[in-house]
Amino acid sequence: LAKTTQPISMDSYEGQEVNITCSHNNIATNDYITWYQQFPSQGPRFIIQGYKTKVTNEVASLFIPADRKSSTLSLPRVSLSDTAVYYCLVGDAGSARQLTFGSGTQLTVLP
Amino acid sequence: DAGVIQSPRHEVTEMGQEVTLRCKPISGHNSLFWYRQTMMRGLELLIYFNNNVPIDDSGMPEDRFSAKMPNASFSTLKIQPSEPRDSAVYFCASRPAGGPTDTQYFGPGTRLTVL
């Protein structure tokens, strides 16, 4: 499994764009990159997934460079309600050993 | 859809007692996962099923833990006997059939406290 490294915590202010970068140097050809969000006392929630280049949905954008050794989750104009832990996962979900959640990044949005 | 349903939401028990956690996955999903989350160890995958068959249980901590999935709409995680170090939030998640992508849908969790 590809190991991921992301910052332990980040602070931001309301209305700002937040970028959280995840490093995954040994990503394999079949691996996808998936981001989850977890609020206190809730289970993680899928945010976005990608394989290469850029993916955008109604919640976030995911930027993946050509070498795929890192990825950046971009949250536009964050609000207080975006305060949560964000997890980056890398792997082939079709394999026998499932994706592993790392420590995640605690994002705190300040007023 | 009601989403993944877990019961009970909270469980308080005494050391040595048997604990059974229950999960109903989203209808039509063919993969089911059990996770444990603690402050010290984060979110750990315990076991996962595919089409009701256990595929990988390497995360199950020890023989006191067992999981079953008798049909596509129900799974249990049992701890017997329970110990204080088992105190954690236990999540169940399900995933639709498909290839290499991963979109797991998590339940609300069961907060277990073993005294």
Image (tube, coloured by chain):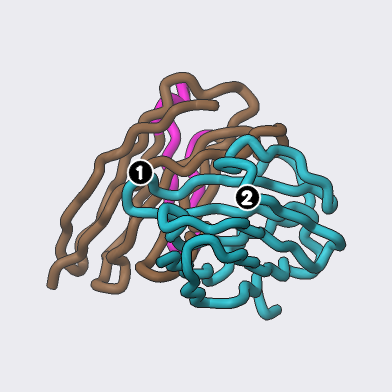
Q: For mark 1, give the secondary structure.
A: loop
Count of number-bearing discs: 2
Q: Which residue is mark 2?
A: B65
Q: Magenta segment range?
A: A52-70
Outermost residue on the front side: it is B16
Q: Colour of chain B?
A: cyan
Q: Is residue A80 magenta?
A: no
Q: Position of residue A42 (x, y in %)?
A: 45, 69
Q: Residue at x 58, y 33 (%)?
A: A91
Amino acid type at circle 1 is Ser
Q: Which residue is mark 1?
A: A103
Q: Tell me the brown chain.
A: A
Q: Residue at x 44, y 28 (%)?
A: A3
In the picture shown, does residue A60 fall above or below B100?
A: below
Which of discs 1 and 2 lies nearer the camera? The answer is 2
Q: Position of residue A40 (x, y in %)?
A: 35, 68
Amino acid type at circle 2 is Phe
Chain letter of the residue carrying label 2? B
Chain letter of the residue carrying label 1? A
Quarter in which the N terminus of chain A is drawn: top right
Q: Residues within 10 Å of mark 2 (few under 14, many from 20)?
A: some
Q: Are marks 1 and 2 on the same chain?
A: no
